Amino acid sequence: MSTEIMVFLAYGVGIFLIFFFGRLLLLPARLIGRLIVNSLLGAGLIALVNIIGSAFGVGIPLNVLNAVITGVLGVPGVILLLVLLN
């Protein structure tokens, strides 16, 4: 094979590897971003439920398990905790 073809193939393989590893590294970043957004929405909703629910005797305790459920599931997790705990 000529040198030009080898250089072309080397660039092609290099670009493919950059895209492959770039996509591989972006996947955890998206997951972490979604987890952060779910956690913030869930924490806000738990605080809102505790503030409004205190007048009605309804509340969600703040602990590690509830934080994990809220972080993973987001708003549906808060609704699940509200139904299960009250």
Image (spheres, rainbow, N blue to C red):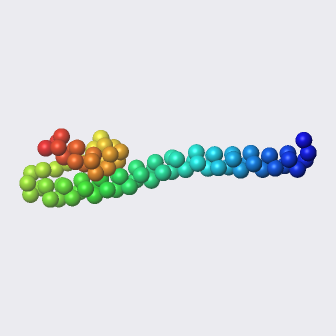
Residue at horizontal 55%, vertical 50%?
A: 26
Where's residue 53, x and y in %? 13, 55
Where's residue 15, x and y in %? 71, 50
Residue 16 in view here = yes
Name the side, left or right, on which 81 lies relative to 16. left
Residue at horizontal 9%, vertical 57%?
A: 55
Where's residue 45, x and y in %? 25, 56
Q: From the viewer's side, name the closer residue of 51 and 27.
A: 27
Residue 67 in view here = no
Identify the image quadrant of residue 81.
Answer: top left
Image quadrant where one finds the C terminus: top left
Residue at horizontal 17%, vertical 43%?
A: 83
Name the side, left or right, on which 5 lies relative to 63. right
Identify the image quadrant of residue 44.
Answer: bottom left
Name the side, left or right, on which 15 lies relative to 28. right
Q: From the viewer's side, name the closer residue of 14 and 35.
A: 14
Image quadrant where one finds the N terminus: top right
Q: From the viewer's side, name the closer residue of 10 and 58.
A: 10
